[in-house]
Image (cartoon, grey):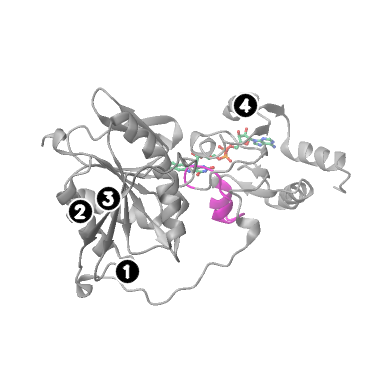
Amino acid sequence: MNKQDYRDMWVYIEHEGGAVHPVSLELCCEIRKIADAAGEKLCAVLVGDLPEEELDRIRACGVDRLLRVRGEGLLPFSVDAYTALFTALCEKYRPTAVFVGGTIRGRDFAPRFACRLPTGCTSDATELVYDPKSGDIEFIEPAVGGKMMAVITVPVMRPQVGTIRPGTFKYLPAGPRPCETVEERFDFPPEKIRTAVLGFEPEENDESLNIADAPVIVCVGNAVKADALPKYRALAARLGGKLACTRPVFDRGLLPFKLVIGQSGAVVKPRLLLSFGVSGAVNHVTGITDSEKIVAINKDPDAAIFHYCDYGIVGDMDEVCEAMLAQLGEKV
Ligand SMILES: Cc1cc2nc3c(=O)[nH]c(=O)nc-3n(C[C@H](O)[C@H](O)[C@H](O)COP(=O)(O)OP(=O)(O)OC[C@H]3O[C@@H](n4cnc5c(N)ncnc54)[C@H](O)[C@@H]3O)c2cc1C
């Protein structure tokens, strides 16, 4: 394989109900910078149609080319059709890299078409670095339970395929550039699709579970006792914020998965994060680094969380929570 035969960086545009998934826009903004560093074009790959204002949001990221695909059997999404489609598109256009949001959909079809080509696929990267010497992308992600950061490259094969966790990058559009639209037709025989959508039930929109944009977050770690949860909930409410947790708290069945912060959960960016009884594992910390101010409470003075906070309190989490509530005039 001659790497020089491959050009341009692609971002898959995931969309639902006429709106682009935020991760696709975040990726377009970040890959714009990497494509510039590599002297390559940024191409957004869209299957189906979108309203013009959504197309404008994509173009605003500085996309050079919009590759729009229409055809039989492509909608609604199926892993069979998308695997075949991206295999065919990559064989025809030969991009250097294909970036896919690490959503349920993206994690499903990206490794499959990478395997068909065949090339390498890195899953769930939380950082991307372009190496100008090798021309390779470094996909960086926490490994071994968060004890180390793995740097993964696809040094021989092309394209370099990777899924990237939603919320890893910001939607900061660089502004539109001249953008050409290339129309492509691809038909996938519907009888070859091995799955069927039997029904659609929208998720109940419980606003208290949406922590991504909360201005204040009270996060409880594994040290939390089940019967103490109400006071952390009360503290969050008193501060106009929301309750969140680490992964083990969800594993114990105390709080829903949507409240988990970290690598496998949500990325948050509150003005204030109060972190109670959290050790500071990398898998969790990757989700809190955009917080403006972090106050950590842990009884272990050597806990890793103290490396990431602005203010650290060594003490018992329940006692500190109660003291904060009392200070705020709340009955404990
Ligand atoms: C692939 C993968 C993905 C993962 N994704 C995530 C993720 O998205 N989010 C996530 O959170 N984790 C994730 N994890 C798990 C992660 O590695 C850690 O195991 C987890 O974050 C630890 O949670 P914790 O700090 O709450 O618990 P622990 O590690 O059990 O820490 C509890 C802390 O509480 C302190 N403590 C104990 N009693 C008290 C007290 N009375 N008062 C004050 N402090 C006290 C202890 O000193 C300790 O530091 C992932 C792991 C893997 C392998």
Whether label 2 lies within 8 Å of ligand 1 gets the answer: no
Considering depth in this image, is 331 or 311 the residue closer to the camera?
311
User: Quadrant location of residue 278?
Assistant: top right
Element type at mark 3 = helix
Element type at mark 2 = helix
Element type at mark 1 = loop
Residue 237 vertical placement versus 173 (above, below): below
Element type at mark 4 = helix
Identify the disc placed on residue 111.
3
Label 1 close to label 2 by CB (< 8 Å): no
Considering depth in this image, is 151 or 36 the residue closer to the camera?
36
| Quadrant the N terminus occupies | top left
Q: Is 251 part of what is drawn in magenta?
A: yes
Lower sequence index among marks 1 and 4: 1
User: Quadrant location of residue 327?
Assistant: top right
Ligand 1's image quarter is top right
Residue 252 visible somewhere in the drawing: no
Instruction: Report which residue position mark 2 lands on.
Output: 89
Label 2 close to label 3 by CB (< 8 Å): no
Instruction: Report which residue position mark 1 lands on.
Output: 75
Identify which amino acid the numbered label 3 is placed on: Pro
Q: Is 63 part of what is drawn in magenta?
A: no
Mark 2 residue crowding within 10 angstroms, few (<14) / some (14–19) / many (20+):
some
Identify the disc placed on residue 306.
4
- What segment carries the magenta color? 248-264
Considering depth in this image, is 216 or 300 the residue closer to the camera?
216
Considering depth in this image, is 154 or 16 the residue closer to the camera?
16
Lower sequence index among marks 3 and 1: 1
- The percent coordinates of residue 56 (x first, y second) are 43, 53
At 72% from the left and 37% from the top, the residue drawn is 317
Separation of disc 1 and disc 4 at Cα?
Answer: 48 Å
